[in-house]
Image (cartoon, rainbow, N blue to C red):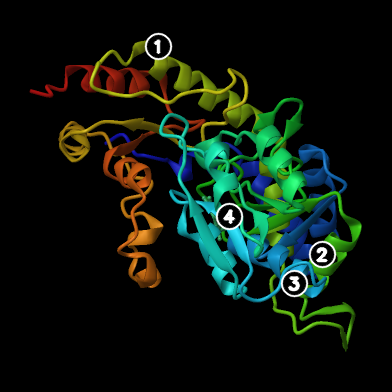
Amino acid sequence: MIPFLDLKGINAQYRDELKEACNRVIDSGWYIQGNECKEFEKEFAEYCGTKYAVGVANGLDALTLILRAYKEFGIVCDDDEVIVPSNTYIASILAISENNLTPVLVEPDINTYLIDPEKVESKITSKTKAIMPVHLYGQTCQMDKINEIAKKYNLKVIEDSAQAHGAYFGNKKAGNLGDASGFSFYPGKNLGALGDAGAVTTNDEELASTIRALGNYGNHKKYENTYKGINSRLDELQAALLRVKLRHLNDEIEKRRAIASYYIKNIKNEKIILPTLRAEDNHVWHLFVIRVSKRDELQKYLLDNGIQTLIHYPIPPHKQNAYAEWNNDNYPISEQIHDEVLSLPISGVQSLEDTKKIVKKINLFDFA
Ligand SMILES: *Cc1c(COP(=O)(O)O)cnc(C)c1O
C-alpha cells in the first residue's frame, strides 16, 4: 500500500539528530520554558522573517490566543465579527467562536481554494474587526488585496499559516504577511513535531508579550496574574525536536515540489482538475489536491489499487452539527469543493516509483 503520508519514514530520516535532541532535553533537567523553546522561537522567527515567535501548545491555541490578546487590548469585543473562508479546516473557525466572536464565512475562489478577496468587502459591517485568511493546502492567499481591504476598514489581519510554513507571497513568507499568524506543528504538517505544538509569529512586541503571558496563566511575572490566562506552552522536548525538523524544512518543501510538478506534468485525465498555482515558486504543497466529479469512485479505485488518498475536508464547516445555526445557509462553492476534492499522497519520502504508479493508475481510471 502506498500510504497517504509515511510519518514514520519522514522522522526516520532524522532519527539520530532527533534522539540526540531528546537526550539533550532529558539530561538538561529543564522541561518547560527553557533554552530549547527560546532557541526554537528565535530560529522560527528568523525563518519566517518576523521579529517574534511565541511557542504555544498547538495551532488552534495560536489562533485563539491572537484574538484573545486583541480582546485584552480592547481592539475586539464580544460579538464582533471576524471574516474567515467558508472552506477552511474547522480550527480556524473554532478560534473565533471560542472568543465569543462571530465568524463570517466568505466563499473561496473555485480555482485556488483560497478566500476570494473580491467577496470580502461586501461582508464587512461596523462589527467587523479582523480578517483571517487561511493559506490552505500550502499556498498563500492574495495578501496584497486582503491587506489593502484591511487597511481601508482598519481591520486586523490574522493569518492561519498552519499549512503554509515557508510559503511566500512576493518576497515575504507566511507568518509575516499580516498583523499576526498562527502556526501548527501537528505531526502531519510540513514542519511537524512528534506530538502537539504551535506558534504565533508577529512583528508586534506588545502582542507577542501578551500572548506569552496569556499562554502562561496570564502572568508576565510568576505568581502575578495580569489576565485570566490559560496553560498553552511549547514544551522543551517538542521544541528540541522542532529545531531538528526546521533545519530540514526547505529540503522537505523541495521534495514536495518535485512530486507536485511530476503530478502536474503527467496526470493526463481530462476529467481531473489539477491545482491552480498563483505563482510558480510559492506553493509548499502541504496537500496536493485534485478536483473530480466522481471523487468517491476514484478514491475507491485507487484504494483497490493500493493507493491511499484522503479528503480535506469531507464536510464544510457550515454543515457541521457544531454550527447548527448555519446548517441551512448556502455556500455553493464550498459545498462543491467538499464534494469533489481528493488529496493525493505527497511527502519528502515518497519514491519516484510510487509517484509514477499513482499517476499511471489515475490516468487509467475510466470515468464512463
Ligand atoms: C492543522 C490546522 C489547524 C490547527 O492546528 P492544531 O495544531 O491541530 O491545533 C488550524 N488551521 C488549519 C488550516 C490547519 O490545517
The disc placed on residue 265 is 1
Which three-letter amino acid code belongs to the residue tagged 3?
A: Lys
Q: CA distance from mark 3 to mark 4?
A: 16 Å
First reached walking from the N terminus: tag 3 or tag 4: 3
Rendered location of residue 158, percent (x, y): 68, 52
At 76% across and 81% down in the image, what residue appears?
217
Which of the pair 274/24 is nearer the observer?
274
Q: CA distance from mark 1 to mark 2?
A: 50 Å
From the viewer's perspective, tell me whether residue 330 is left or right of residue 25: left
Mark 3 falls on what kind of element?
helix
Circle 3 sits on which residue? Answer: 71
Q: CA distance from mark 4 to mark 1?
A: 36 Å
First reached walking from the N terminus: tag 1 or tag 3: 3
Q: Do the CB atoms of the residues marked 2 and 4 lie less than 8 Å apart?
A: no
Mark 2 falls on what kind of element?
helix
Which three-letter amino acid code belongs to the residue tagged 1?
A: Lys
Rendered location of residue 73, percent (x, y): 82, 71
Q: Which quarter shows the N terminus?
A: top left
Which of the pair 140/165 is nearer the observer?
140
Q: CA distance from mark 1 to mark 3?
A: 48 Å
Disc 1 C-beta below 8 A from ligand 1? no
Few, some or many residues within 10 Å of mark 3 (<14, 14–19, 20+): some
Which of the pair 349/174 is nearer the observer?
174
